[in-house]
Amino acid sequence: MIKTDILIIGAGPTGLFTVFEAGLLKLKTHLIDALPQPGGQCSEIYPKKPIYDIPGFPEVLAGDLVNNLMEQIKPFQPGFTLGERAETLEKQEDGTFIVTTNKGTRHHAPVVAIAGGLGSFEPRKPPIPNITDFEEKGVSYFIKDPEVFRDKKVIISGGGDSALDWAIFLADVAADVVLVHRRNEFRGALDSVERVSELSKKGKIEIITNAEVVGLEGTDRLERVVIRHKDVARGEEFREINDFIPLFGLSPKLGPMGDWGLKIEKNAIKVDNSYDYQTNIPGVYAIGDVNTYKGKLKLILSGFHEAAIMCQSAYQIINPGKKYVLKYTTVGGVEGFDGSKKEAKKEVVQSIG
């Protein structure tokens, strides 16, 4: 039986930052994740994808963000159960919880924080009959290493942020980048749309709108695609390519958590955001992309905020009646459980008058 103060289900960015916030409160943490390494989607799906909306980082690769978070939480010595899925949640008579994984590992804690991102996820595949024949043979739903596409002819399908971001990134990697979207308007960030448009004018990206990839052809590997235009006069065209990357998002599934008695709305866990992101089960919280409430923004920075608030509430459950005085890290520094301490830099303030 693994015992801890806060059991965190999900080791993505939000789950990892929860370790830091809990550590400041001298609370021990342990994380469970079905993936074999920490980082969630940032490590498993797009470690080389640049992220632009992390405060203080004009641009940071998803994998580097995970590495930084791991370095940040090192003083607090979290435990990890990786490669195992949280299967059951059992509330004990004393109000604590036992969470058991699919491999039988049992965890005991007074507080459970679900930070499972989108839960388990599968790529949304376009309805192309023989697409599975070319998976790992020219068809990729995720990009882990952009160098795989170095000097290749690549077609990307999709109109959201992932399709736009990767088209921009691969413009400097691949020999040819073609972006195919079934509509005229893209639904990604305006800045990304403008950058794609600029790269198109420079001849680094070819944009084909009002069209879809409807067929794949090849012998042992993908060799060409069939693009069907909505304009009947243009009909269908064939393109010789090396790789096809359909980026239509992920189909999220809560998995076993959906049977834990939690209130679920549109495949997300409802929480009380007026106070602490607690679920309908006292002592169980949901933070990050896995939760939902009015005005919810599925952003990493939102998960960071929710983690900080949640840990303050969890402290009261773990230490009933004990008052905690918030100390800023700029004043008190960061002290790990091993006694090591990073001192805050002392500032000299000059009085003018």
Image (cartoon, rainbow, N blue to C red):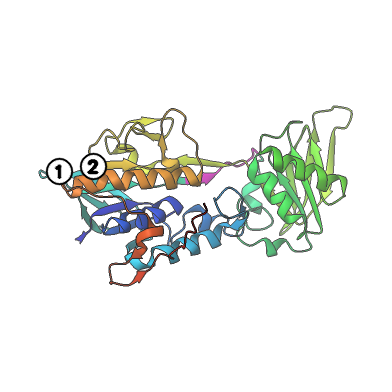
Residue 289 on image: x %, y % = 45, 41
The residue at the point 49 percent across, 60 percent down is: 66
Quadrant where the N terminus sits is bottom left
In terms of secondary structure, where does tag 1 sit?
loop
Residue 170 visible, this orientation: yes
Residue that numbered label 2 is attached to: 283
In terms of secondary structure, where does tag 2 sit?
loop
Question: Between residues 5 and 333, which one lies in front from this camera angle?
Answer: 333
Alpha-carbon neighbours of circle 1 within 10 Å: few (<14), some, or many (≥20)?
few
Q: Is residue 108 found left or right of 51 in the rendered image?
A: left
The residue at the point 78 percent across, 32 percent down is: 210
Quarter occupied by residue 269:
top left
Residue that numbered label 1 is attached to: 95
Residue 106 on image: x %, y % = 22, 57
Residues at discs 2 and 1 in contact (Cβ within 8 Å)? yes
Residue range highlighted in magenta: 121-127
Q: Is residue 218 magenta?
A: no
Residue 38's place in the image compared with 286, above or below, is below
Q: Earlier in the sequence, mark 2 or mark 1?
A: 1
Looking at the picture, which amino acid does disc 1 mark?
A: Gly
Question: Between residues 331 and 169, which one lies in front from this camera angle?
Answer: 331
